[in-house]
């Protein structure tokens, strides 16, 4: 059954052009110490794709040339496993950029699955460079977290949070921001973000003495591993119908692709990280890689939409920064 996103936005007289280029989201590779069921990147310890020094250098050059790009959002895989990650963070901070890291809490303990390199230093590194840390925690209980992400993940995540708290993250007055991400464990929309955040804060503080700043709710996108699991169990059409029926024009107005560009590990450009993983580049009339970057041309591009975009526009909306409406 076709699910036409273009038809839907036309029905609501929405155009959704780019509004700004405030964020450069950079995927530095697909290597990860985990292989989570819902991962739209299909990241795992077996993946070898990684951004090289030349491409990382070009990212920094683009940031230096454009003060309008205020934020560098680094993701993966586990981005900390890229050999140029530390350098990129340090260089971006020298430029006065806000740096967000999509940090896998367990990598502090597992290290690099290929080289064995320890990553125990990361909490101190993040604090030194005043990075905003964004970490996934599917639930505040072991059962649901390990069900989605693997045995032992919850306990490691709790200890990883404790280390971040210990160096000042989420402490009043520190300015060190630790945000958590919630993905539903299954084929349903996330509950209201504010209510879930209150639940997480209460439970994590009471049970573990842990603190964080904000909770981002993200809808599971119907692509890659999650889509394959839906198809395998005959649930794909019902999930897509759920997303389509929950379409929210206000959430559509706030989609993250309107204020960012996504850079692949090899420098190719997409409108968002989800498009990137589906090999959907920016429209052909726009610059295709970070090496032929043109700020004005990219700001004037037409955003590429497809059926998975219903995931970002359902209910309260979804983005890498949580709800959008």
Image (cartoon, rainbow, N blue to C red):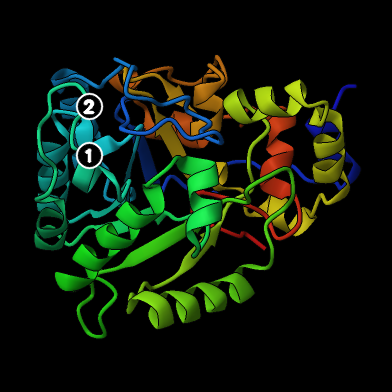
Quarter of the image with the N terminus is top right
Give SS at disc 1: helix
Q: Is residue 120 above or below residue 240?
A: below
Q: Which mark is residue 110?
A: 1
Residue bearing mark 2: 113
Residue 247 position, x and y percent, is 81, 49
Q: Label 1: few (<14), some or many (≥20) within 10 Å? A: some
The quadrant holding residue 148 is: top right
Residue at the image point whose x is 54% and y is 33% from the top: 37
Say left or right for 200 vs 1: left
Q: Are marks 2 and 1 in contact (CB under 8 Å)?
A: yes
- Could one spot residue 302 in this view of the protein? no
Q: Which mark is residue 219?
A: none
Say left or right for 324 vs 67: right
Q: Nearer the viewer, residue 221 or 187?
A: 187
Say left or right for 98 vs 304: left
- Could one spot residue 243 in this view of the protein? yes
């Amino acid at each position: 059954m076709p699910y036409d996103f273009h038809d839907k936005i036309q029905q609501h007289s929405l155009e959704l052009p780019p509004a700004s280029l405030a964020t450069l989201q950079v995927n530095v590779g697909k290597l990860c110490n985990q292989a989570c069921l819902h991962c739209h990147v299909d990241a795992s310890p077996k993946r070898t794709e990684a951004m090289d020094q030349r491409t990382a250098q070009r990212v920094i050059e683009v940031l230096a040339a454009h003060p309008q790009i205020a934020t560098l959002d680094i993701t993966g895989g586990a981005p900390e496993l890229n050999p140029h990650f530390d350098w990129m963070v340090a260089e971006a901070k020298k430029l006065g950029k806000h740096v967000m890291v999509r940090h896998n809490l367990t990598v502090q303990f597992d290290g690099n699955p290929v080289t064995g390199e320890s990553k125990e230093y990361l909490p101190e590194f993040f604090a030194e460079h005043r990075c905003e840390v964004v970490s996934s925690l599917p639930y505040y209980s072991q059962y649901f977290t390990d069900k989605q992400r693997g045995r032992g993940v919850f306990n490691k995540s709790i200890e990883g949070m404790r280390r971040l708290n210990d160096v000042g993250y989420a402490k009043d007055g520190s300015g060190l921001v630790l945000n958590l991400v919630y993905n539903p464990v299954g084929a349903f929309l996330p509950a209201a973000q504010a209510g879930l955040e209150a639940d997480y804060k209460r439970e994590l503080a009471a049970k573990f003495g842990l603190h964080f700043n904000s909770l981002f709710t993200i809808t599971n996108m119907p692509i890659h591993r999650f889509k394959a699991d839906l198809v395998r169990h005959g649930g794909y059409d019902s999930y897509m119908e759920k997303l389509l029926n929950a379409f929210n024009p206000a959430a559509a107005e706030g989609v993250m692709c309107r204020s960012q560009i996504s850079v692949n590990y090899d420098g190719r450009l997409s409108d968002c990280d989800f498009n990137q993983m589906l090999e959907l580049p920016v429209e052909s009339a726009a610059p295709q890689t970070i090496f032929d970057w043109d700020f004005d041309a990219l700001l004037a591009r037409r955003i590429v939409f497809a059926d998975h975009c219903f995931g970002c526009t359902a209910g309260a909306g979804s983005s890498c920064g949580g709800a959008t409406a």
